[in-house]
Image (cartoon, grey):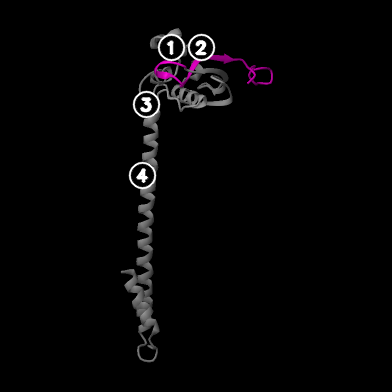
Amino acid sequence: MGKILRSLANFADSLNYSACYRSLPLVMTGLHRAADSFAAGFISKVAKQLLFFGLLSLFSAKIAGAQNATELTPKPELTPQQVVEYQLSAFQHNDEPSPDVGIKKAFRFASPANQQSVGPISRFISVVHSPGYVALLNSREAVVTKVQVVNDQARLLVRVLSASGSEVFFLFLLSKQSEGEVADCWMTDGVVGVQPADDGQPKVGI
């Protein structure tokens, strides 16, 4: 429709109408405006549709990512940092959608030896809620600041800004498993609280 109006306007422009048809310029102005209005409306409609589908794709990707994170389990392709970051995220959202579900997710990535030491899950939940580790739960921020990987051993330093606003450091100790269903998977052997030195930095060398 817009092309038809534009063609009519351009055709009429080519005619010598000044002498015979004094009112024709008004008609021409109307045709041009109609064509412009139609084109603008069409472009606006297309833009809105593109925006809608773009937002829909982004929203769908976020949902898929959240579902994948919820179901994440030990896999050989996960790096030590990815394992720790997943555990930190689980601790941060510990009570979503139900109490202590985050601790249960993190427990999946405890090595078999660690699970035997701090398990069963009910005991592990109590450990994480203890004063030495409670800062991990529902924290404002949790960031891996340093990573050291030597053969099948890894140490990661983590800075946590607790829900109360205090800064705490933790050292995550991981190892690559050598047998069973989790062979070649990086899993957490232990987590140690680290005290900061006088300059505010943790007393640990990585």
Q: Which residue is mark 2?
A: 131
Q: Mark 4 or mark 3, which has the lower sequence index?
A: 4
Give amino acid for label 4: Leu
Q: Residue at x 36, y 74 (%)?
A: 6
SS label for mark 4: helix
Q: Which badge, 4 or 1, comes first in the chain's sequence? A: 4
Question: What is the magenta range?
Answer: 178-206
- Cα gap from disc 1 to disc 3, whole angstroms: 19 Å
Asked if residue 109 lies in the magenta stretch, the reply is no
Q: Where's residue 148, x and y in %?
A: 59, 23
Secondary structure category for the residue under label 1: helix
Question: Type of residue at label 1?
Answer: Gln
Q: Which residue is mark 4?
A: 56
Give coordinates of residue 99: x percent, y percent: 37, 19
Residue extending farthest to the left is 1
Q: Choose between 21 and 59: the one closer to the eye.
A: 59
Question: Is the Cβ of the residue at disc 3 closer than 8 Å to that at disc 2?
Answer: no
Q: Secondary structure at mark 3?
A: loop
Placement of 110 over or under 60, stated as above or below = above
Disc 3 versus disc 2: distance between alpha carbons? Answer: 29 Å
Provide residue 72's location: percent of width, then percent of height.
40, 26
Q: Which residue lies under the disc numbered 3?
A: 71
Tag shown at residue 115: 1
